[in-house]
Image (cartoon, rainbow, N blue to C red):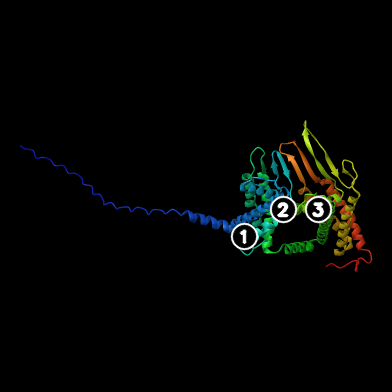
Amino acid sequence: MDEEPTTRKLDVVEVAPTTEVEPAPPVEAEPVHARVAEVRDRLEASGWVDAAAAAGLGFLVVLAVGSVLVLAAKLNFPSLGGGSDPLDAFTAIVIAGLSGLGTPILLDGLAVSALPLGALLCIGFGIMWAVRTSRKEAGFPTVVAAAAHGLRVGLPFGLLCWFFALVFRFRGQHPVSSSAWIALLAGLFWGALFGVLGSVRVMETLAAASRRISSGLRARDRSAYEGVATGITMLSAAAVLGAAATLLWIIVSLTRGAPGRHFGAGDAFAYLIYLLAFLPNVVIAIVSFSLGAPLAVGAKVNLGGKLVGPLSDYSLTSWGRGDHPPAVVWLLILVPIFVFVLGGFVARRRASDAKTMLPVMLIGSAVFAVTITLLAAMGELRLAGISKGAGYAMVAPDIVLLLLFAFLESGVFGVIGWKLAERPGFLKNRYPQAR
């Protein structure tokens, strides 16, 4: 019997039809210029673009001052830099310009540091002009915002000083360069200081700002206001008389034929530039000398672990190594006497009450003494070895004695001027009302 073939049923699984997945659209990369524009907008909103522009313009002023100093040196010494290429000339301009900020010049193992206060003032006014020129908006909402913008200027300005000091230098057997790290610190400090002054000047003139500050001080403490005003009066009078003494010294030197036979027009122009660059230094030195503070001139070198060498003091009582000063030098003693008597006289005329003499004169003497001492410390000339203990040379007043003499003499002669102003005939009203 034939068997029927068995059939096997297969389970059929129905598969749902698959849906096709559409590919995601490609993500377009953001263009580079869009990102750059976004970063620029953020920097502009925070004020960094204007600060960088002000720093760049300010550094151009540094280069301009350096070019004038290099021109003066070339006129004074025609053989200087013979055969140099434009890169060498630009390097010399950078080094000279940075020296206007107080950056030491490194000369083959020696560091020459001098801060020409006249050149620094030119650079400072240039930075203030740059801040005002680069500012796109009309002003600042508050004084704090203006000061913050001025502080921003210091960072790019300091970085520019550091970069140029690091790159532009004379290499070779006898290298000459600027100290890059001190250039950075000097650029940060002076850039921020003059940047703040320039930012405040955008809102109002410095004269108006000073009047507003003085009015606030006057309303808060009348004696402090009168004391500060007395110190400023003494400083102004000392600057005028010191400049007059400098001019008289130059005239006497010219009449005696001090420059020599080969003194020409180029030398005259060079000396004029030197005088403008260092005039505040010379005036401060003369005022310090007239106060009785000795002026140290000389050098010391390291021999066998000891610093030896001639370092002489020049003062009203000693001239060099034990010599007596010329008789004409004693005329300088009239400078502080007149300045301080005038300061006390004006202080009494400004005062509303004679009983405020002691606090007014103490504050005025402190303002004068501290200011003249700080300026003298900034304006000293020093040449030192880079290695520790190598020796140094200097032309600088004794800072400690200068501070002491300035405070005591301004106080004593200021009181004399105050008392003179109270004598009948000096004032129409012996005790004027407060103004």
Instruction: State which tag comes first along the sequence, 1 or 3.
Output: 1
Please provide percent x and percent y for residue 379: 77, 49
Query: Can residue 219 be seen at all in this image of the molecule?
Result: yes
In the picture as drawn, the residue positioned furthest to the right comes out as 424
Q: Which mark is residue 120?
A: 2
Left-right relation of 87 to 425: left
For marks 1 and 3, give the CA distance.
34 Å
| Viewer-closest of 32 and 67 | 67
| Viewer-closest of 318 and 192 | 318
Please provide percent x and percent y for residue 119: 72, 53
Quarter occupied by residue 143? bottom right
In the picture as drawn, the residue positioned furthest to the front comes out as 261
| Viewer-closest of 343 and 331 | 331
Which residue position holds label 3? 283
For marks 2 and 3, give the CA distance.
15 Å
Q: Amino acid at mark 2?
A: Leu
